[in-house]
Image: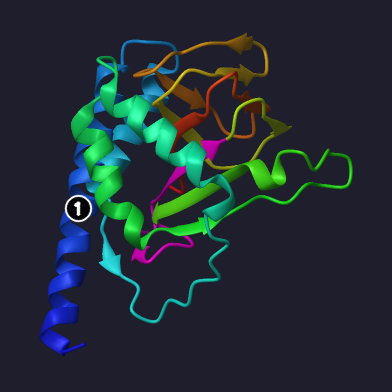
């Protein structure tokens, strides 16, 4: 591939990534009056100020999405046909998926392994992806029907832009259904989980590193 062609593709990738950040910031802004409003506002500002670049030396250890391909296709189709989901957001995600890095979380010793081969994360921006960003990591979570993600917590604050039906759990709140178009915010180190129902689950998540 010629250098000019490679540079052109990188420029397009960065443009798509920036467009995705704009859509994410707008969605977070729409939920700034809800619970955790201050934290969501801070996350929105971090998204708006995120600096992107191409990680030229990145070598992906790609898990692949083949085993969950049908769930991905079905959930994207449902999201695009839903009047509750932002079509422009889904389009931005689709533009970045060809260059996404697919990973899966392994089961811990006290967790069942049922979910391992029935879920995937497509890293599109930030840590582990081809588009470098120090302040935020964005990924697309796909789960086959009937899967529960293990209860867990982590230091970074986290948000989800929900693109399908599904149930979400948060310590102190219990299980709830934000619905397509909803936003879920997990404060630092809070225990949380998510599970799909009869249909695949799709959500864009963000981990805040600042």
Residue 22 on image: x %, y % = 19, 39
| Relative height, residue 196 to residue 101 (above, below) | above
At horizontal 52% and vertical 48% (from top left) the residue drawn is 121
Q: Which quarter of the picture shows residue 43?
A: top left
- Whether residue 38 can be seen here: yes
Is residue 114 shown left or right of residue 127?
right
For disc 1, the marked residue is 16
| Relative horizontal placement of residue 96, taking residue 197 as reference (left or right) | left
Give the colouring mode of the picture: rainbow
Q: Residues within 10 Å of mark 1 (few under 14, many from 20)?
A: some
Residue at 48% across / 62% down in the picture?
128
Q: Is residue 141 inside the magenta stretch? A: yes
Magenta residues span 125-143
Q: Secondary structure at mark 1?
A: helix
The residue sitting at the bottom extreme is 2
Q: How many numbered badges does the structure rendering display? A: 1
* Magenta stretch encompasses residue 156: no
x and y, in percent, of residue 174 in the image: 66, 11
Residue depicted at 65% across the width and 26% down the height: 192
Q: Nearer the viewer, residue 95 or 18?
A: 95
The one of 195 and 28 positioned closer to us in this rendering: 195
Foreground residue among 192 and 196: 196
Residue 161 pos. (x, y %):
39, 28
Query: Which image quadrant for residue 77?
Result: top left
Place residue 159 in its image quadrant. top left
Q: Is 148 positioned to the left or the right of 157 in the image?
A: right
Asked if one can make out residue 207 in the rendered structure from this viewpoint, the answer is no
Residue 122 drawn at (x, y percent): 46, 51
Q: Is residue 201 above or below residue 132?
A: above
Where's the N terminus, which quadrant?
A: bottom left
Residue found farthest to the right: 110
């Amino acid at each position: 591939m010629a250098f000019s062609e490679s540079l052109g593709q990188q420029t397009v990738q960065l443009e798509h990534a920036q467009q995705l950040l704009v859509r994410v910031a707008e969605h977070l802004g729409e939920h700034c009056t809800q619970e955790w409003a201050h934290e969501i506002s801070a996350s929105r500002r971090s998204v708006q100020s995120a600096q992107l670049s191409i990680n030229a030396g990145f070598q992906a250890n790609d898990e692949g999405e083949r085993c969950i391909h049908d769930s991905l296709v079905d959930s994207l189709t449902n999201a695009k046909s839903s009047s509750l989901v932002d079509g422009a957001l889904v389009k931005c995600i689709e533009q970045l998926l060809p260059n996404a890095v697919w990973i899966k979380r392994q089961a811990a010793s006290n967790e069942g392994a049922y979910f391992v081969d029935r879920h995937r994360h497509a890293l599109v921006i930030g840590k582990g992806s081809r588009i470098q960003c120090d302040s935020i990591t964005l990924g697309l979570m796909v789960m086959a029907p009937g899967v529960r993600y293990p209860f867990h917590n982590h230091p970074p604050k986290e948000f989800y832009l929900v693109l399908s039906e599904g149930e979400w759990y948060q310590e102190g709140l219990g299980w709830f259904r934000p619905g397509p178009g909803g936003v879920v915010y997990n404060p630092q180190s809070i225990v949380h989980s998510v599970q799909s129902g009869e249909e695949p689950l799709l959500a864009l998540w963000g981990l805040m590193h600042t």
